[in-house]
Amino acid sequence: MSKQRISFIDLAKVNDPDILPELELCAKQGTPRPESQAVRAHRPPIMKAFATAWRESFLDGVVTHEIKELCRIYVSRSVKCEYCGNQRSEKSRNAGLVEADLLELLEFEKSDRYDAREKAALAYTEAITWDLTTTDELWDRLHKNFSEPELVELGFFIALTMGQQRWLRTLNIQHHQVLAGTEVSMAPGFESKQSAQDSSKAKDYWAK
């Protein structure tokens, strides 16, 4: 296991009254789970700013949450952020998104699993993630499927999760390290520390 590069805050030494409730909310609801916020909490204003931006652009907002979850996991699969890619949004699960919906994300244009709106959002995600040249055709497609407020929210969210995932993958943080004991928002096979270790050794593990 690679060495963790930035520590988690010491929960016993927390003085800011907003930090522990935020971490407990992460442990209860997931995505984000508490480990990433326990790193950001070294700078409480940054942790709080992230929590607000994440809530407004991902958990709430004007774009269908399941679409944003597809985009989030597309980023995970692209940049190979294992910490983020082994999480699942409980809100999207409750809305009916299943593991099979994630299998063809990197080949979304060829797949018949996604509708026109989902494919447009994933094309937007692809362009931002891979720094592709955007064309009039792409923007016509986006404006056909989304309003401008939706495009702002979706673009901001994609950029936010892409930047955070690229950062988090450098930290080598693992799940089940902070406020451990819950499997909320974990992908199948990653519900516990031991099962996560076993699953990551599988021959078909997505991050290999």
Image (spheres, helix red, strand yellow):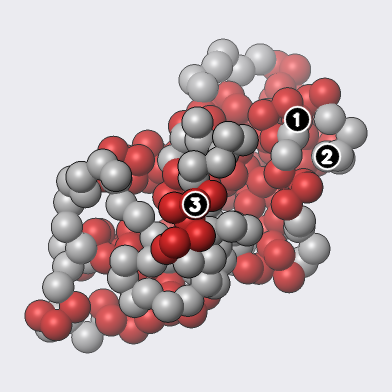
Name the quadrant of the N terminus.
Answer: top left
Q: Amino acid at mark 2?
A: Tyr
Which structural element holds mark 1? helix
Residue 192, above or below 118: below
For mark 2, what is the residue? Answer: 114
Query: Percent from the top left, x then y, of residue 82?
Result: 45, 44
Q: Which mark is residue 198?
A: 3
Q: Are marks 1 and 3 in contact (CB under 8 Å)?
A: no
Of tags 2 and 3, which is closer to the observer?
A: 3
Q: Earlier in the sequence, mark 1 or mark 3?
A: 1
Disc 3 residue type (three-letter):
Asp
Residue 85 in view, yes or no: yes
Q: Amino acid at mark 1?
A: Phe
Q: Height in image: 163 above or below 173?
A: above
The local secondary structure at tag 3 comes to helix
Helix, strand, or loop for circle 2?
A: loop
Disc number at residue 108?
Answer: 1
Q: Residues within 10 Å of mark 2 (few under 14, many from 20)?
A: some
